[in-house]
Image: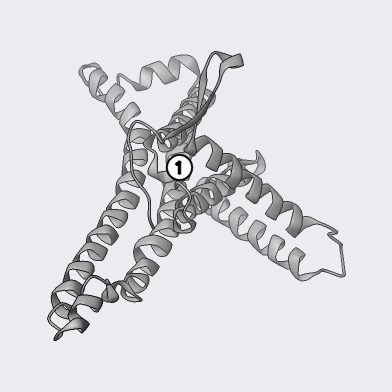
Amino acid sequence: MNQEFTVTGAKVLFEIPILGGIAISETIVNTWIIMALIVGLCLFLTHGMQVRCRTRRQIVAEFIVQKVNAMVGENMGEHFLQVGYAPMIASVMALSALGSLSGMVGMYALTSDLNTLLGWALLVFVLITYNKFRSGGPLGYIKGYFQPIPVLLPFNIISEIATPMSMAFRHFGNIASGTVIMGLLRWALANLSFFIFSKLPGVLGQIFGPIPLLQVGIPAVFSIYFDVFSALLQAFIFCMLMMMNISSAAED
């Protein structure tokens, strides 16, 4: 996955003078591209749905809906399933997975930008706060900061903010570490290739020495884990933490 990680944001592509010079970065453009792909895929899978004569597309769509509903129902409860949290969880998971995998086709991966993950963390914080207000009311929400004893107020405030923040940094760190490892692997293979093939006698060493032959095939094997499997796993873990934190907030 060839991508560059940044905390401050992706490269700015252009600005919109009419809107006060709002900067449009690679992250924003690629986010809209991936969202368009997700919407297009949903329209493709659900086009021409029937009650009895089901097509392969409809079977795939029904399978996805059933699995997401089962996951939300088991981890959040029937209430959250009824109020429509399943589509949101599925959207975040798809956006996270495709956002990470987009780096494999030369795009700037969404999860390479910490601003994206902090935005998702803000969404989690808002939903946690909303469910605490809904379950205990404003007084119950404020009272929760003084539990079990009032002296823990500063720590409870930090904990409230740290929960979504830790989710964002954990996701960012795991994806970034995989990219760093793959970069180091390619660098090591290039140097090893030069060390081995430059030893060939005569003109063979001059021809094959500069060519990183060991980079052919070997990185692809490791990429299956660090790029593909890791991207899907981190999307799943982020959504699981999202569901657990939101549902536990409603129980407090």
Picture coordinates of residue 242 (x, y %)? 45, 42
* Left or right, residue 89 beside residue 158: right
200 is higher (above) or lower (below) than 139: below
* Left or right, residue 173 beside residue 234: left
252 is higher (above) or lower (below) than 185: above
> In the rendered view of the protein, which quadrant contains the N terminus?
bottom left
14 is higher (above) or lower (below) than 92: above
Q: What kind of colouring is applied to the model shown?
A: one colour
Image quadrant in which you'd find residue 112? top left
Picture coordinates of residue 49 (x, y %)? 83, 59
**The one of 105 and 230 positioned closer to us in this rendering:** 105
Residue found 22% across the figure and 60% down from its top? 184
**The one of 56 and 65 positioned closer to us in this rendering:** 56
Picture coordinates of residue 35 (x, y %)? 61, 44
Image quadrant in which you'd find residue 36? top right
Q: How many badges with numbers are in the image?
A: 1
Residue picked out by circle 1: 242
> In the rendered view of the protein, which quadrant contains the C terminus?
top left
Picture coordinates of residue 63 (x, y %)? 66, 64
Residue found 31% across the figure and 49% down from its top? 176
Q: Amino acid at mark 1?
A: Met
